[in-house]
Image: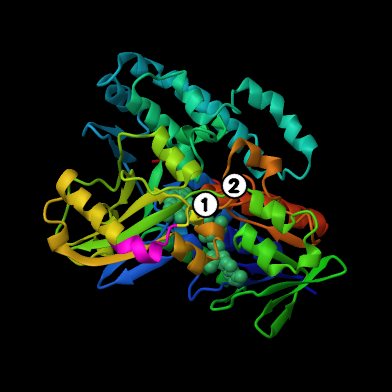
Amino acid sequence: MRKKIAIIGSGFGGLSAAVRLQAQGFDVTVFEKNERVGGHAYQLKKKGYTFDMGPSLITAPDVIQKVFAAAGRRMEDYLDLTYLDPFYRIYFHDKTFIDYTGDSAKMRQEFAKFNKDDAANYDRFIEDSRKLYDAVITDGLGTTPFMDLKTYFGFVPKALKLNALFPAYTFVKRYFKDFRTRFTFSFHPLFIGASPFRAPAIYLMIPYLEKNGGVWFAKGGMYAFVQALEKVFLELGGVVKTNSPVDEIVVKNGRATAVRVGSDVFAIDAVVSNADFAHTQTKLLKPEHRKKWTDKKVLRLDYSMSAFLMYIGTKKKYPELLHHTLILSERYKELVKDIFDKKILPDDFSMYLHVPTRTDADMAPEGCESMYVLIPVANLASGLKWDTIKEQYADKVLQFLEEDFGMKDLRANLDVLELFTPEDFKRDRNSHLGSAWGVEPSLQQTAYFRPHNRSEDVSNLYIVGTSTHPGAGVPGVLMTAETTHKLVCQDFGLSFQEKMHPEPIVG
Ligand SMILES: Cc1cc2nc3c(=O)[nH]c(=O)nc-3n(C[C@H](O)[C@H](O)[C@H](O)COP(=O)(O)OP(=O)(O)OC[C@H]3O[C@@H](n4cnc5c(N)ncnc54)[C@H](O)[C@@H]3O)c2cc1C
């Protein structure tokens, strides 16, 4: 008899865990509350425009290959990836910009425009970023289950040697002087919902991860990756139930025995929850089963920022925008503080623009542009009523893009405008406080100190996704699925064998 596993939620964490566990020999059913799979990587289609609603940058293709390899597949047979060069353009408040790429010579040239010493220190920084990358990826720290303090303290001497526990910005300041270079190499924690001023420098492995593995775009957008995982899962015989919000993880004698969707109860041998951690803990488990992670403890955690998103279709092309563009406010540390600590909506903003039509014309009608604007904002602890203020805020952003940034006639050419706010994260995805990146990966909330991949309250219940180790970002959540896969194998007496993809992908 094959054992049954229920997976709650179909984000990248849930889907990749589903592929791995179905391929391992379990009968896996994915329960997703929404109409379609994908979670934060949901897709919006309107009037011929296609928008990825969340993640847009594909990094670490080797981590993606491992998921396909676990199912005996080749990523290349399911995904058509294009290498992006430059990775992104970063505009600073004074209209200067840096084209950020994986090419060392080009990078040194870019930085030399502003500070010769910074250009000279680039190689040293990248070498140290490589050491952090090796610790996380090559040596497997990112997929080590941090189930006890011994594992954590085992890593501390190495972390200290690598200065990996310094705040990220402090680490970067030691190499670079110019504000542009300091930003370029310290902002990556924001990609995973962390403040660069308190996230540990271990996350500065990302610059090397990008340089080494590249930044890619999947034909059809990020949703093509979601569909590829769903396809593999279905080919393996897995079952997906959409419009199926799980209301309860049924527990008997301390073990997860079933999931309940409305009045339907599905008996299982194990549950993997990919739903938001706070939602899983406080809404899906009855109070008597929450011993270690009491409501008080769950609610006391620091939750990451949220995002204000604008999905924009324009009847005009804006070729001056690259595929990925950052447009920054003059304030960095203070702006991050407003978002993470003061939880206010300041007058200024920094933003990220995704313009997939730069690479894939099929994402919009001919001659048109599909793009999204992402502005990091405070989570709902701010008390802001986004349903009331969103239109006004969107007008302000459009005005800025047209009048300050120079996107000529933007408002006159708007064909589609859809907004997604922290309140939508809460409503659509069950994200606690509308946080878009879950439990904040600060030093006090990393590795052992994040929610564990094996529940500490209920046996045969596992957690996967953003709020577990190593955390948010597509490669991060794919790694959480690998960690959970290892633990399930351990607990069911199966051998875990990581299958490697034979040919590494190169840009
Ligand atoms: C705007 C944005 C941009 C990003 N950009 C990038 C990027 O460019 N590159 C990158 O690598 N990362 C990026 N990230 C991060 C990355 O997208 C996320 O870390 C990752 O997608 C999260 O996946 P997950 O598996 O943790 O779960 P989620 O995507 O959060 O999925 C959880 C799923 O659980 C479902 N669910 C919740 N409750 C229930 C229930 N009771 N029953 C059934 N289902 C339930 C939800 O509907 C959802 O589908 C971005 C994130 C955001 C928000």
Three-letter amino acid code at the position of disc 1: Trp
Looking at the rendered structure, the kind of residue marked 2 is: Asp
On the image, the x and y values in percent for residue 214 come to 41, 40
Mark 2 Cα-neighbour bin, 10 Å: few <14, some 14–19, many ≥20: some
The answer to whether mark 1 and mark 2 are in CB contact below 8 A is no
Q: Is residue 233 left or right of residue 307?
A: right
What residue range appears in magenta?
A: 384-391
Up/down of 250 relative to 132, above or below = below
- Identified at 69% across, 42% down, the residue is 449
Name the residue nearer the viewer: 145 or 396.
396
The residue that label 2 is drawn on is 302
> Which residue lies under the disc numbered 1?
437
Where residue 368 sits, quadrant-wise, is bottom left
Q: Residue at x 51, y 73 (%)?
A: 34
Residue 460 falls left or right of residue 136: right
Of helix, strand and loop, which mostly describes the magenta segment?
Answer: helix
Whether label 1 lies within 8 Å of ligand 1 gets the answer yes
- Return the residue found at the far bottom: 263
Q: Is residue 387 magenta?
A: yes
Give the x, y percent position of residue 58. Answer: 43, 49
3D distance between C-alphas at marks 1 and 2:
11 Å
x, y percentage for residue 419?
A: 34, 64
